[in-house]
């Protein structure tokens, strides 16, 4: 019995030794793993009192500590270089580079790259910092994306200027922060104010679809991907930003000259530099309507882009290169801009090559919708580095229109809750598709038995998209009403 008891004790000791050895090995492996995965030195502290709450070699541990102290809104995390990399309720400052340099980002939940220039729009909404402390998730001009912490700065929005919206004389105004140091803003009247927005009130929005009077509520909703605290119960889509290029304007040549006269332009420019009263666009509105007749691309939308890109038709590129649209005038090398034989050639190339073959072609990688849009959808996604290029083009369209197109062109605009197919006919073949979460906008022409007839984004021939064909009024598609948000 004693011998058996001793054998049992020896087995127990060996088991304890094996267990302790395994535990020690796990500890060593864990320690080595932690050392290998160290990604900096991060200090959690109160930015007002400078009281410190710990220093960590892993950002995620610092992040957990900061969130455990979330009742104190002054808690921040700085890295080994003293740069703030995380905090509560913040603004992302993109105006950190020269005007010739863009900032790249990756759209959240995708591998899609994007870019913007902080000199044209300074502030985005801070959402969170990645678990390795290297990237920041933000929202700006509708896009939710990740940007390198090295390309931006973070500020509390209570201590920092920011963009906002307000209503003035029935118009929705966007005051866009251009430079925080000089408190410089650019104000745009982008369309008629929706009924749910009132005068003498400041509104905040970083997508132009949902509006708030309280930044804390805006930040909370965006973080949780809801709109519970928004002023509006349904998403707002500004007509002038979301009307597709595949629409026919109701304006004529005299409307364009009337607008130019209202801003002091009364003669045609023939040489650069031109007088303040001259423009290559004056008396040339017929070029745009003629190209509309050839391509079914909205003439007033093209005229609006020309106003925006050519400085009212007074830029050197517009006058000497006949380049009205900033084609190939990249931020890093604007002198690379295209040259055209004539204004007629430029406008046609813009409609046919740039739009029909590219930005309005659902089979092209540049396609995100043929409307002006923002950085989430539309031409603005890739056409321009200015995050508010779409709003600026829309602002010109609004000023030109005087309600004519607004009252005549019917559009359907939604952020999809389901995938959506566009068919060549009722119960026909699929022309092109959109995915759940995409913003879509169509010119609506008819409906029957649960189907909507819309203007296709591209020419249709023999039941298929054919971008080399002529677009006509018969280039229509069909969508099932049940596929739209009900």
Image (cartoon, grey):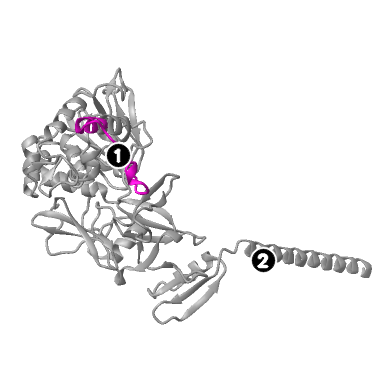
Q: In front here: 393 or 441?
A: 393
Q: Answer above or below: position of 274 versus 45.
A: above
Q: Which residues are magenta?
A: 328-349
Residue 346 screen position, x and y as percent? 24, 33
- Badge 2, how many Cα within 10 Å: few under 14, some, many 20+? few
Please state if 394 lies on the left or on the right of 114 as rendered: left
Q: Residue at x 43, y 48 (%)?
A: 109
Between disc 2 and disc 1, whose residue precedes? Answer: 2
Q: In front here: 43 or 69?
A: 43
Residue of label 2: 31
What secondary structure is marked by label 1?
A: loop
Q: Residue at x 41, y 61 (%)?
A: 128
Name of the residue lying farthest toward the top: 462
Q: Is residue 340 magenta?
A: yes
Q: Which picture quadrant has residue 205?
A: bottom left
Q: Answer above or below: position of 354 versus 237.
A: above
Q: Residue at x 31, y 68 (%)?
A: 157
- Badge 1, how many Cα within 10 Å: few under 14, some, many 20+? some
């Amino acid at each position: 019995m004693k011998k058996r008891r001793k054998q049992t004790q020896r087995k127990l000791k060996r088991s304890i030794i094996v267990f302790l050895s395994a535990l020690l090995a796990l500890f060593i492996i864990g320690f080595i793993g932690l050392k290998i995965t160290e990604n900096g030195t991060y200090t959690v502290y109160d930015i007002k009192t400078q009281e410190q709450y710990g220093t960590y070699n892993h950002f995620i541990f610092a992040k957990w500590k900061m969130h455990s102290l979330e009742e104190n809104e002054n808690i921040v995390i700085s890295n080994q270089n003293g740069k703030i990399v995380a905090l509560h309720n913040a603004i992302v400052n993109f105006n950190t580079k020269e005007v010739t340099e863009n900032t790249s980002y990756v759209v959240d939940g995708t591998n899609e790259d994007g870019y913007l220039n902080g000199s044209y729009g300074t502030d985005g909404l801070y959402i969170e910092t990645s678990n390795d402390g290297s990237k920041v998730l933000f929202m700006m001009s509708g896009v939710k994306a990740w940007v390198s912490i090295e390309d931006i700065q973070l500020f509390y929005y209570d201590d920092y200027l920011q963009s906002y919206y307000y209503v003035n004389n029935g118009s929705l105004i966007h005051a866009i922060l251009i430079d925080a140091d000089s408190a410089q803003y650019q104000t745009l009247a982008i369309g008629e104010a929706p009924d749910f927005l009132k005068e003498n009130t400041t509104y905040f929005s970083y997508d132009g679809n949902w509006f708030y009077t309280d930044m804390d509520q805006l930040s909370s909703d965006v973080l949780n991907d809801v709109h519970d605290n928004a002023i509006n119960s349904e998403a707002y889509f500004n007509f002038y930003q979301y009307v597709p290029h595949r629409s026919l304007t109701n304006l004529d040549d005299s409307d364009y000259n009337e607008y130019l006269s209202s801003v002091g332009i009364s003669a045609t420019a023939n040489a650069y530099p031109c007088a303040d009263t001259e423009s290559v666009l004056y008396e040339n509105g017929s070029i745009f309507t003629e190209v509309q007749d050839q391509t079914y691309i909205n003439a007033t939308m093209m005229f609006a882009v020309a106003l925006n890109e050519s400085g009212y038709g007074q830029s050197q590129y517009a006058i000497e290169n006949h380049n009205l649209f900033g084609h190939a005038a990249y931020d890093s090398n604007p002198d690379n801009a295209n040259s055209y034989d004539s204004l007629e050639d430029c406008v046609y190339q813009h409609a046919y090559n740039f739009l029909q073959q590219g930005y309005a072609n659902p089979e092209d990688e540049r396609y995100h919708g043929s409307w002006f849009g923002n950085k989430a959808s539309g031409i603005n996604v890739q056409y321009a580095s200015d995050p508010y290029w779409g709003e600026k083009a829309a602002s010109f369209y609004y000023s030109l229109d005087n309600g004519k197109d607004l009252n005549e062109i019917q559009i359907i605009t939604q952020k999809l809750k389901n995938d959506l197919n566009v068919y060549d006919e009722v119960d026909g073949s699929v022309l092109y598709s959109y995915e759940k979460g995409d913003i879509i906008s169509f010119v609506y022409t008819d409906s029957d038995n649960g189907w909507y007839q819309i203007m296709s984004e591209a020419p249709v021939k023999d039941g298929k998209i054919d971008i080399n064909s002529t677009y006509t009024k018969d280039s229509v598609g069909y969508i099932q009403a049940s596929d739209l948000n009900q």
